[in-house]
């Protein structure tokens, strides 16, 4: 079965961002449909998405659920992949208070 082509990396300039992005470093869990969850490292976060690193293979377009300490799973879609790095977009943007709480957890 042929694998989908890798999506190009998105522009990384501040002007191309739709919302404030914060550097974080935290362990979390991710799962896709029908799969057991696995660990990832979340390396940055915005109200509309996150960037993560993991050795587990996911393909752009895959729906996933991100579980951060103390929070319910957050639904997202894999937007791009570059080897072991992934960019994911939340299906519903994070509330500002939830975003601030996650950033504070990562700095604790």
Image: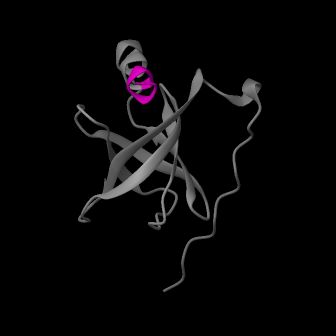
- At a point 74% along the width and 26% down the height, the residue shown is 14
- From the viewer's perspective, is 70 left or right of 98? left
Quadrant of the image occupied by residue 2: bottom right
Is residue 1 part of the magenta span, yes or no? no
Q: Is residue 82 left or right of residue 74?
A: right
Position of 28 compared to 73: left or right?
right
What residue is drawn where x is 66% and y is 28%? 17
Q: Nearer the viewer, residue 21 or 106?
A: 106
Quarter of the image for residue 39 reads bottom left
Residue 24: image x %, image y %? 52, 33
Q: Height in image: 48 above or below 37? A: above
Q: Quadrant of the C terminus?
A: top left
The main secondary structure of the magenta stretch is: helix
Q: In the orientation shown, which residue stands out farthest toward the front?
A: 108
Residues shaded magenta:
103-108
Q: Residue at x 48, y 59 (%)?
A: 54
Q: How is the image coloured?
A: one colour
Residue 44 x %, y %: 55, 35
| Residue 19 % position (x, y) | 58, 22
């Amino acid at each position: 079965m042929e694998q989908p082509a890798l999506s190009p990396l998105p522009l990384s300039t501040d002007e191309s961002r739709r919302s404030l992005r914060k550097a974080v470093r935290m362990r979390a869990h991710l799962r896709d449909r029908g799969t057991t969850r696995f660990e990832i490292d979340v390396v940055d976060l915005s109200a509309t998405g996150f960037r993560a690193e993991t050795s587990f293979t996911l393909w752009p377009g895959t729906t996933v659920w991100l579980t951060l300490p103390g929070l319910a799973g957050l639904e997202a879609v894999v937007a791009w992949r570059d080897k072991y790095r992934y960019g994911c977009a939340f299906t519903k943007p994070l509330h500002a208070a939830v975003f601030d709480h996650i950033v504070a957890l990562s700095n604790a």
